[in-house]
Image (tube, rainbow, N blue to C red):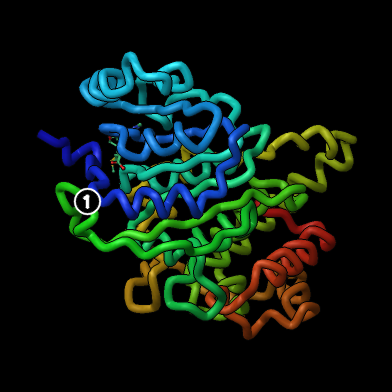
């Protein structure tokens, strides 16, 4: 009696579990975070490899089964089970995260982990194949999207293992992949709200040129409003007070049905949302000229987000900021 809604697909191939644990590079001194331990097939091998496993599981029946499985064995002293929804649980310190997660929480969980402090060494996570390929995509790849750039901004990501559906019971509808996520240390020093606002605009239509995106009336209006706010704050000497926004805003990133998820709207030209939005082209605007001058300065006018590297995005944002143009 597995719960589909909780993404309960149990790993039944012991060789695969071994391979995941081996590729994780667990040290005997490691505190390991496991998310969704289920019946404990992975948990057992994690306990054997590391010092301590903290497992967060939402389903009380699974928690019971897990506790029963290790009860009276020497492993039980090194297992701590937290019953709860991992997205609502305050995470403890851990060195490494290894997990076969329910796929519906992929995106919010990834960002929750990446914003966790102090940051961990790495996370080895099973994702739905397409989500995994989005995380590791490179500029120009079909799956390269805002999720890719947002993740690679915070971490180095690599593909470890392809996993077919038949390794699970019951088998899910889709294939899976194990990915390694290593948080960048130190972090890239850009305010997260600024970065997030910037990428939202750039990926609004990922296959349009930046020149046409930044000519849109709604974009110009927003940036001009931000610009005036920043100028006003500078004049009143409060410009430095707004410096503490270093977190991705979960309320905006978290809902897997909209933003960064598989079903997101940045999947390619044919799925692009058509927003009613006139160009201000033709309409003279001093501020629009200022914005376009920044694009010209960095030679970005004819470029498209689908092909820009993380470094190019960072460079473009720095040019905007230098011109006093902000995205948050
Ligand atoms: N780790 C086990 C394995 O590999 O055999 C089970 C993996 S199964 C894909 C996902 C597990 O996550 C299930 O046990 C499910 O109850 C649990 N789960 C689902 N949503 C969760 C949440 N929000 N927080 C914590 N655990 C959750």
Disc 1 residue crowd, few under 14, some 14–19, many 20+, Cα 10 Å: some
Residue at left offset 20%, top offset 39%: 5
Q: Nearer the viewer, residue 203 or 48?
A: 48
Residue 216 in sight in this render: yes
Task: Say whether mark 1 is within 8 Å of ligand 1.
Answer: yes
In the picture, which quadrant includes the N terminus? top left
Q: Nearer the viewer, residue 81 or 71?
A: 71
Q: Is residue 38 left or right of residue 196?
A: left
Q: Is residue 48 above or below residue 82?
A: below
- Point out the residue furthest to the left here: 1
Q: Is residue 157 above or below residue 209?
A: above
- Dot 1 lies on which element? strand
Percent x, y for residue 305? Answer: 57, 74
Residue at left offset 56%, top offset 80%: 209
Residue at left offset 38%, top offset 60%: 177
Which quadrant contains ligand 1? top left
- Point out the residue furthest to the top here: 72
Q: Is residue 82 left or right of residue 41?
A: right
Residue 278 in sight in this render: no
Percent x, y for residue 94? Answer: 58, 31
Residue at left offset 72%, top offset 64%: 314
Q: Nearer the viewer, residue 317 or 10?
A: 10
**In which image quadrant can residue 211 be found?**
bottom right
Percent x, y for residue 56? Answer: 40, 27
Q: Which residue is mark 1?
A: 168
Percent x, y for residue 215? Answer: 60, 73
Q: Is residue 77 above or below residue 263?
A: above
Say how many tags the image has.
Answer: 1
């Amino acid at each position: 009696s597995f719960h589909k809604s909780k993404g309960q697909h149990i790993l039944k191939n012991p060789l695969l579990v071994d391979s995941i644990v081996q590729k994780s590079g667990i040290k005997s001194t490691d505190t390991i975070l496991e998310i969704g331990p289920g019946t404990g097939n992975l948990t057992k091998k994690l306990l054997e490899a590391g010092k301590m496993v903290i497992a967060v599981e939402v389903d009380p029946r699974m928690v019971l089964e897990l506790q029963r499985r290790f009860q009276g064995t020497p492993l039980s002293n090194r297992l701590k089970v937290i019953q709860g929804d991992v997205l609502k649980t305050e995470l403890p310190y851990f060195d490494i995260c290894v997990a076969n997660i329910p796929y519906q929480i992929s995106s919010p969980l990834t960002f929750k982990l990446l914003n966790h402090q102090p940051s961990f060494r790495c996370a080895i996570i099973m994702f739905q194949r397409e989500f995994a390929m989005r995380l590791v995509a490179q500029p120009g790849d079909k799956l390269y999207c805002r999720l890719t750039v947002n993740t690679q901004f915070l971490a180095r990501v690599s593909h470890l293992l392809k996993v077919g559906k038949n390794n699970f019971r019951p088998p899910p509808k889709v294939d899976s992949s194990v990915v390694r996520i290593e948080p960048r240390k130190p972090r890239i020093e850009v305010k997260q709200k600024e970065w997030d606002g910037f990428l939202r605009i750039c990926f609004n239509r990922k296959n349009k040129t930046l020149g046409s995106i930044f000519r849109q009336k709604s974009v110009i209006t927003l940036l001009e409003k931000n610009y005036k706010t920043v100028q006003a704050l500078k004049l009143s000497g409060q410009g430095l007070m707004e410096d503490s926004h270093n977190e991705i805003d979960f309320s905006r990133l978290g809902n897997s049905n909209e933003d960064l998820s598989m079903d997101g709207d940045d999947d390619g030209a044919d799925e692009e949302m058509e927003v009613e939005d006139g160009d201000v082209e033709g309409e003279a605007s001093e501020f629009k000229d200022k914005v376009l001058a920044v694009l010209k300065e960095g030679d970005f006018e004819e470029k498209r987000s689908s092909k820009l590297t993380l470094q190019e995005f960072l460079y473009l944002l720095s040019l905007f900021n230098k011109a006093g143009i902000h995205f948050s």
